[in-house]
Image (cartoon, rainbow, N blue to C red):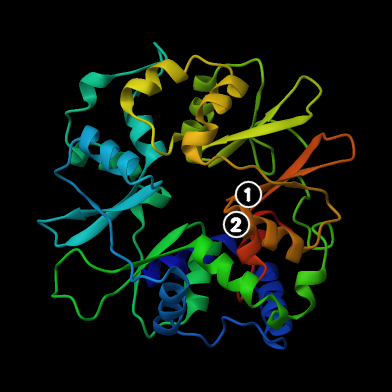
């Protein structure tokens, strides 16, 4: 996996960008970043103390049917789990609620194909190839948290940390998510230097996000008069995690994301898909724990960080004084600003 990460870096960097990377890393190394020297063993100890419990790893198996995988995710109200392969003796993928819905969804009829529910999960795993779900990075407890953050800047949302006390070739480990790192950053924000006092505009976190549609820097949105199924089709095809719900004037109303599927069952899915987004969200808000965050370009990184952690949200939508949508800042975007190097700048040609 480390080789894969090195290849990713080489692929996205030109000679000029490599020079810019060295310059940015030098600037960051001169400041006191709280996660630079912390190892994962210490981080997990902090995490468990905050939750008053040691984590139990929840996972699916390649032999599960789609129905069993969906039930596991729904019953436990989680958005994704690692997938264990008994023959390989290793985790081979991460499976999300959006993945299961994508496998079950029949686009021509815009309905759920329940006949696929009894199909084994292994049949669909090849569809995760070259996607985030196909990358299961497992780190040692002696590795530094900055290594986790580097993987997060490259597109992963969660990593596994090895459980050294578990027998070999058994489904074990501890999961660290982007939300876990965000909580730590928020709690130790005073040790993060002056970056937290800079605004989203100063940090270039909203640039190139003003045009709706599909493409680099474009906002992913759904109009309030469309059907929810159209929104999920865009989530499937564009591999994005959320859509902004807007009116005809592009004023922000709400968001639709994988979180809105938390706790849902297959029978309910069929009914909900034909609804307009606002109606869907009204019916699902209480059951899913739906929250939405907004701010303006003048918000500081600390204000954004605090709001995301307090509301347990995965993104914050940036609006102007007229409530028109201008951009979105995700957990990945925030974490990039604390990581040794911000790879998102390379992809957007901002360095």
Label disc, if present, on residue 71 of the rendered structure: none
Query: Disc 1 designates what residue?
Result: 315
Q: Is residue 79 left or right of residue 218?
A: left
Which image quadrant: the C terminus? Answer: bottom right
Crowd band around label 2 with a 10 angstrom C-alpha radius: few (<14), some (14–19), many (20+): many
Q: Position of residue 78 (x, y in %)?
A: 38, 47
Query: Disc 2 designates what residue?
Result: 331
- The answer to whether mark 2 and mark 1 are in CB contact below 8 A is yes
- Residue in view at x 57 percent, y 84 percent: 36
Q: Quadrant of residue 334?
A: bottom right
Q: Position of residue 52 (x, y in %)?
A: 41, 71
Q: Nearer the viewer, residue 200 or 151?
A: 200
Where disc 2 sits, the SS reads helix
Q: Nearer the viewer, residue 282 or 313?
A: 282
Mark earlier in primary sequence (2, 1): 1
Judge whether 254 appears above or below 50 on screen.
above
Q: Quadrant of residue 224?
A: top right
Where disc 1 sits, the SS reads strand
Q: Position of residue 73 (x, y in %)?
A: 32, 43
């Amino acid at each position: 996996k480390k080789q894969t990460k090195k290849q990713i870096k080489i692929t996205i960097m030109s000679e000029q960008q490599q020079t810019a990377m060295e310059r940015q890393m030098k600037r960051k190394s001169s400041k006191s970043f709280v996660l630079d020297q912390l190892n994962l063993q210490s981080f997990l100890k902090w995490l468990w103390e905050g939750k008053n419990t040691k984590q139990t790893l929840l996972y699916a198996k390649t032999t599960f049917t789609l129905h069993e995988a969906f039930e596991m995710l729904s019953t436990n109200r989680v958005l994704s789990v690692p997938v264990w392969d008994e023959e390989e003796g290793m985790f081979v993928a991460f499976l999300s609620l959006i993945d299961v819905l994508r496998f079950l969804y029949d686009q021509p009829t815009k309905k759920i194909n329940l006949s696929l529910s009894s199909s084994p999960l292994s049949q669909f795993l090849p569809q995760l190839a070259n996607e985030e779900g196909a990358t299961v990075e497992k780190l040692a407890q002696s590795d530094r948290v900055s290594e986790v953050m580097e993987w997060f800047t490259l597109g992963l949302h969660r990593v596994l940390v090895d459980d050294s006390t578990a027998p070999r070739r058994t489904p074990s480990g501890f999961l660290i998510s982007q939300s876990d790192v965000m909580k730590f950053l928020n709690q130790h924000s005073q040790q993060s230097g002056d970056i937290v006092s800079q605004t989203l505009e100063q940090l270039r976190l909203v640039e190139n996000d003003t045009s709706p549609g599909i493409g680099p820097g474009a906002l992913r949105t759904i109009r309030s008069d469309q059907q929810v199924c159209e929104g999920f089709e865009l989530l499937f095809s564009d591999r994005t995690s959320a859509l902004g719900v807007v009116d005809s004037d592009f004023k922000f109303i709400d968001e639709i994301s994988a979180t809105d599927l938390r706790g849902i069952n297959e029978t309910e899915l069929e009914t909900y898909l034909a609804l307009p987004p606002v109606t869907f969200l009204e019916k699902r808000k209480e059951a899913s724990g739906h929250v939405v965050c907004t701010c303006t370009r003048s918000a500081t990184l600390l204000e954004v960080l605090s709001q995301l952690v307090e509301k347990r949200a995965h993104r914050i939508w940036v609006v102007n004084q007229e409530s028109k949508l201008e951009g979105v800042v995700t957990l990945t975007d925030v974490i990039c600003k604390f990581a040794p190097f911000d790879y998102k700048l390379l992809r957007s040609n901002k360095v």
